[in-house]
Image: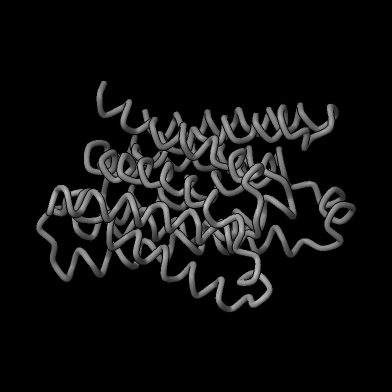
Amino acid sequence: MDRILIGFFPALIWGIMPLLLHFFKGSAFTQLLGTTLGTVIIGSILFLYKQPQITLKIIFWSFLSGICWSIGQLGQYIGYRQIGISKVIPISTGLQISGNSLIGGFLFQEWQTVDDILKGVLGICIILLGVALGNLNLKTWKSRNKTIFPYLFLILTTIGYWGYSAFPKMIPQASANAELFPQAAGMFIIALIFLVSRKKDVKKMDRLFLNTLGGLLFGGAAIAYLLSMKANGIVNAFLLSQFSVVIATLIGILLLKESKAKEMTKVFGGLFLIIAGGILVIV
């Protein structure tokens, strides 16, 4: 039971993060830097307190995992503004679940039997159907965004999340305490590079402090996620954490009023299929 609760903790934090960022304001690049800075602070405190044993292998894979996370997260932060939270989260979640399930199931051999493989593949198909039902409306894309580029950018950057979850599995003997600091360092450095490349955003740093507070929360969720991967495996840990899609989508629809009444049936229908597919994979 404890390992399931650990698995759900990231879902809670990551589910409310979009709402916090909505009120914290700032550009997507400033928000990313603030989030990663808060995570570095948490990672540093934990590292100094626990003083875990660390190796070059742990540093390399964890650092690379952090870089991948920042790529995926930047895509989400930009998508929140261009598409909306209630659209971005189901698309990103569906693609993350599909990719990470296939990586964990086949590459790390977490699907041991034919039944595991059949359930996993069927679950992924249901998830992708849910994404399509709730989001893939070309008429809506063109009328709101003039182009499908924001969706393509989101899809491509979401691949970063696959590396974020997969690379820590290359060091199964490492503890979560040892992984978080180099992972957070990778997140922060690439976020800093992104921000510096945008001169107009460098001049608008007044919201960095508030976004750093959000990063402190994310750091706590990141620790729980690493612990969950050790206890539950990459597939189950990831799927448990991605129940954040329910929280974030409901926030976008009910609190931020992103979807019209006639669209809500499709959004909730797609959300239901994503959850159902995720449960099929995890059970």
Q: In the displayed structure, does residue 156 sit left or right of residue 83?
A: left
- The residue located at (49%, 38%) in the rendering is 122
Along the viewing direction, whichever of 5 and 134 lies nearer the viewer: 5
Q: Farthest residue in the left direction? A: 53
- The residue located at (33%, 26%) in the rendering is 5
Spot occupied by residue 93 in the image (x, y as percentages of width and height) = 54, 44
Spot occupied by residue 32 in the image (x, y as percentages of width and height) = 53, 59
Position of the C terminus, as image quadrant, is top left
Q: In the displayed structure, does residue 197 sit left or right of residue 4?
A: right
Q: Farthest residue in the right direction? A: 143
Residue 166 falls in which quadrant of the image? bottom left
Q: In the displayed structure, does residue 196 sit left or right of residue 255?
A: left
Count of numbered circles in the view: 0
Residue 118 to residue 37: above or below: above
The answer to whether residue 111 is seen in the rendering is no
Spot occupied by residue 212 in the image (x, y as percentages of width and height) = 48, 52
Along the viewing direction, whichever of 175 and 49 lies nearer the viewer: 49
Residue 128 falls in which quadrant of the image? top right
The type of colouring in the image is one colour
Spot occupied by residue 150 in the image (x, y as percentages of width and height) = 72, 60
The answer to whether residue 252 is seen in the rendering is yes
Residue 248 to residue 164: above or below: above
Q: In the displayed structure, does residue 43 sit left or right of residue 23?
A: left
- The residue located at (31%, 66%) in the rendering is 63
Q: Farthest residue in the front direction? A: 206
Q: Farthest residue in the top direction? A: 1
Position of the N terminus, as image quadrant, is top left
- The residue located at (43%, 64%) in the rendering is 68
Along the viewing direction, whichever of 149 and 49 lies nearer the viewer: 49
